[in-house]
C-alpha cells in the first residue's frame, strides 16, 4: 500500500512538535521533523550539524542541500511504512518543489496539510517558556504544559533545556520569515483543497483530538 503523506504547517510555537509526536505514535506514522533531525546533528557535532548551527542560532534557514540529504535518507529508510508526517518541511515554495520531486521519485503525493493557526501575540510567550528534553525531544511549557518535577523530563528524568534559538530577537526573525515565505504554502495547498485548518489556541489535548478526527 502507498504511504500517506501529511504535512504540519504553522508559525514557530504553533504546537507542531507537540502534536507531531503524539499523532505519529497514535497513527503509526514516521515523523520527519527537520528541526529535531538538525538539532540531533548539532548535538552530535557532525559536519552537517556544525554548519547548520550557525544558521539555526540566527533563526535563518539551513542550506537546502543539507536539509534535503536528511529527508531523503529518512524517506528511503521507511518506504514500506503506513504514512509520513512532516514537521518543519517544506518551509517555502521552493522546498515544496523539491518535496514534490522526492515524492514523485517514490510514487507518493501529499495527502493533507494540517495548518495549526496561532496568532502572533501568543508566540513570544510560548517560545520563551518552551523547554525540551534533550533525550526524547518531548516539549514542555513552563506555564501551560509543566513537567511534574521542576525542569526535569517526566519520562527521562533528565534536566530540560532551552533551545538556543528561543531568544526574543531570534523568535522575531523566525516569525517574520514564517509570514513572508512559509505561510504562502498554506495558500498554495488551499488552492489544491488539501488544507485542514485547526485552531492552535485551544488546549494541546483539544488540538490533538481535532487533528485526529480530521485525518
Ligand atoms: P512548534 O513545533 O510549532 O515550534 P511546539 O510544539 O514546540 O511548537 O510548542 C511551542 C510551545 O508552546 C511549547 O512550550 C509547548 O509546550 C507550547 N504549546 C504547544 N501547544 C500548545 C497549546 N495548544 N496551548 C498552549 N501551549 C502550547
Ligand atoms: P524548527 O524546529 O522547525 O523550529 O526549526 C528550527 C530551525 O531549524 C529553523 O529555524 C531553521 O534554522 C532550521 N530548519 C528546520 N527545518 C528547516 C528547513 N526545512 N529548511 C531550512 N532550515 C530548517
Image (spheres, rainbow, N blue to C red):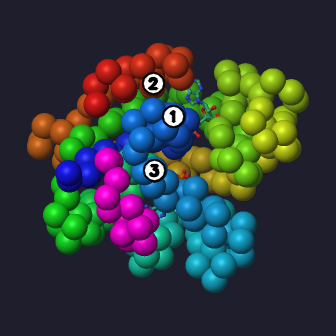
> Which residue lies at the image location 32% right of the left edge and 48% below the top edge?
83
Task: Note whether ligand 1 is within 8 Å of mark 3.
Answer: no
Question: Does label 2 or label 1 sit earlier along the sequence?
Answer: 1
Disc 1 marks which residue? 22
Residue 77 on the magenta segment = yes
What SS does tag 3 mark?
strand
Pointer 2 local density, CA inside 10 Å: few below 14, some 14–19, many at least 20: some
Read off the magenta span: 71-83
Instruction: Establish if 139 lies above or below 119.
Output: below
> Looking at the image, do the residues carrying marks 2 and 1 touch, with CB atoms under 8 Å apart?
yes
In depth, the one of 140 and 123 nearer the eye is 140
- Quadrant of the image containing the C terminus: top left
> Which residue lies at the image location 45% right of the left edge and 55% below the top edge?
32
What percent of the width, then of the height, locates residue 205? 52, 19
Task: Note whether ligand 1 is within 8 Å of mark 2.
Answer: no
Question: Does label 1 or label 3 sit earlier along the sequence?
Answer: 1
Disc 2 marks which residue? 208
Amino acid at each position: 500500500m502507498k504511504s500517506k503523506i501529511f504535512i504540519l504547517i504553522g508559525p514557530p510555537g504553533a504546537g507542531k512538535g507537540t502534536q507531531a509526536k503524539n499523532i505519529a505514535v497514535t497513527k503509526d506514522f514516521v515523523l520527519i521533523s527537520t528541526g529535531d533531525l538538525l538539532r540531533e546533528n548539532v548535538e552530535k557535532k557532525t559536519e552537517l550539524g556544525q554548519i547548520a548551527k550557525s544558521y539555526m542560532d540566527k533563526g535563518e534557514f539551513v542550506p537546502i542541500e543539507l536539509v534535503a540529504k536528511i529527508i531523503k535518507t529518512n524517506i528511503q529508510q521507511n518506504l514500506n511504512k503506513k504514512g509520513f508526517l512532516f514537521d518543519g518541511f517544506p518551509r517555502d515554495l521552493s522546498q515544496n518543489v523539491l518535496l514534490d520531486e522526492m515524492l514523485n521519485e517514490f510514487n507518493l503525493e501529499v495527502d493533507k496539510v494540517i495548518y495549526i493557526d496561532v496568532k502572533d501575540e501568543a508566540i513570544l510567550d510560548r517560545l520563551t517558556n518552551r523547554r525540551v528534553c534533550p533525550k526524547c525531544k518531548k516539549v514542555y511549557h513552563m506555564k501551560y504544559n509543566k513537567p511534574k518535577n521542576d525542569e526535569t523530563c517526566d519520562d527521562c528524568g533528565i534536566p530540560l533545556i532551552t533551545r538556543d534559538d528561543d531568544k526574543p530577537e531570534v523568535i522575531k526573525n523566525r516569525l517574520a520569515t514564517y509570514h513572508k515565505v512559509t505561510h504562502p504554502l498554506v495558500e498554495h495547498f488551499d488552492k489544491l483543497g488539501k488544507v485542514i485548518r485547526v485552531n492552535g489556541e485551544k488546549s494541546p489535548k483539544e488540538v490533538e483530538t481535532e487533528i485526529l478526527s480530521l485525518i
